[in-house]
Each structure stands twice: as structure tokens, then as C-alpha cells.
Amino acid sequence: MNHANPHNLDAVCGNCNHSFPAEADGSIFGVCLKDPEFHPYIDRLFENDFACCSRLIKRKRFMVDRKACADFDPIEVVGDGAELSPKLTADIKDLVAKGELTPENIRAAITMDAFNRIDWSKEPADQYVQRLHAATTVRSRDEALNGLGFLVSRGNKSAFDALCAFFRKLPPPQTPEACHFRAEVLRHLRFASERQREVAQLLVEDLFRTPSNGHTRPWYTEVFGFFKRCAPKVAGEALLPMLDSPKFSYRIKRQVKDIIGVMPHTR
């Protein structure tokens, strides 16, 4: 086992910090939040939204008395002089004040505290990258994408760089489904708000290699929507080269000018 077990708890999944109830009211079944497939749903699970990934829960649940794996991380035992984090202490006091101090709520609070103490910005992204490139179904592809997006939202540079590299290799979209998938990738990249300039440059590079036609119009609309919402200076720096390129039509250039505020007669 990798972690100290000062209270000599049985090494079963139900006594592990990564374990989470498989049902809102608790049950003999649990799921493992260390499993990457659950990462995109963790915040909603902590809000007791089990419907957000009900099929995944049904597929992954296990008996809580199952023998623990090598990642066993024994739960903190409340009482007996155990030291709790200030946040966990406040959460438990809040449960007491609301009359909601149940074993299930205590376990949820402990699990959430353990989750929040993980430095997700330094978690390896390799497993998601491998699964994204190896995906053979839409579901497996989306699960891997959601995992990377979760890490991006937590400031993980490796995940952001991997998602950018994956995006650069995508062929120009030829179907509505392809446009939708690109929009999903962009949605996850937008989580890295502090790297807006890099995302902007990535999108313009993509437009230079993507023809403007009926198939790709939804993607152009999505990209221009991004630039309308981002910082004006970032949008201007990224989009300006498009005005000097013969690749883009008058209609596209007019949209660019509307976004960056260039008067029609000036270029």
C-alpha cells in the first residue's frame, strides 16, 4: 500500500479516500474517483447529481468491501484526535448546524476534501492523451476529451499543450458532427482563460488551413464567437493577418473587421 494507515483500517475500497457512494443516499456500492472517467463529473457528484453519469456509475460500481488496490488511501477517522483540515472542519460544523451529520455526508465531505487537496495542475495527462488518440468510439473519445478538459480547467499546462497538439492534427471539418467536435475541443481550451492569446493564435492558424464553405461555416461561426468574447487586444493581434491574406473572402474579412473594429475603408 502507498499510504500510511494509522488507524489500521481494513484495506477495502469503502475505507479509501477515493471511494464515493454510487447512490445519493449511500449503498453497499461505490465508485472510485481516482478513475479518470469520473474526473469530468466530480463537481456534480459532490452536489449529489448522480444522474450526470448514471450509466458510467452502473458500469463502474463495486461492492465497498472489495479488497483495495495499490492506490489505497485510508480515510481520516473523525475523532480520536485526528487532525482535520480547516475546510473539512468548517464543512462538518456546517453539517452539524443543518442537522445533516450523517455517515454518508461525512464520507462525502472527507472525499471532497481529499479531492481538493490534490494539485491537479501537476497531475500527468498522458493517460488521457493516449486514450484520446486510441479512441475508437465517440463515447471513449469524449470521455478522454473530458478528462483533459478537466485538467485544463485546473491549470494543467501539460493537458493544455496536449489538447492544442491534438487540435492541430485535426483535418478540416466536412460534416456537422466534425464541426461540433471541434467546438467541444475549443470549449475545453477556453477553460485556460489565462492562455487566451495562445488559443486565439491556434484558431487563426486553423482558419488559414480550413476552407470557407457550407461544410465549415458552423466552425467559422464558432471561432468568430470566441473572438467576440475574448479581450479586444488579443482578438486584434490574432485576426489582423487575415485581412492581408488573399485566402479569405470579402465576407469573411468584413466579419473580422466587425470584431476588431477596423473601419471598412481603412484596409
Image: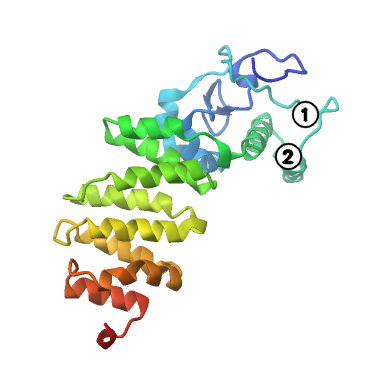
Residue nearest the observer in this picture, 214 or 53:
214
Residue nearest the observer in this picture, 73 or 30:
73
Residue drawn at the location 24% of the way across and 52% of the way down: 179
Element type at marker 1? loop
Q: Quadrant of the N terminus?
A: top right
Q: Is residue 94 visible?
A: yes
Q: Residue 149: x, y in percent?
A: 44, 44
User: How many C-alpha atoms fall within 10 Å of the one at disc 1: few (<14), some, or many (≥20)?
Assistant: few
Q: Residue 173: x, y in percent?
A: 20, 50
Counting residues from the start of the chain, the first of labels 1 and 2 encountered is 1
User: How many C-alpha atoms fall within 10 Å of the one at disc 2: few (<14), some, or many (≥20)?
Assistant: some
Q: Residue 6: x, y in percent?
A: 77, 18
- Disc 1 marks which residue? 78
User: Does the CB distance between marks 1 and 2 fall below 8 Å?
Assistant: no
For residue 88, the mark is 2
Instruction: Look at label 2 and name its amino acid.
Output: Leu
Residue drawn at the location 57% of the way across and 29% of the way down: 20
Instruction: Look at label 1 and name its amino acid.
Output: Val
CA–CA distance in space, label 1 to label 2: 10 Å
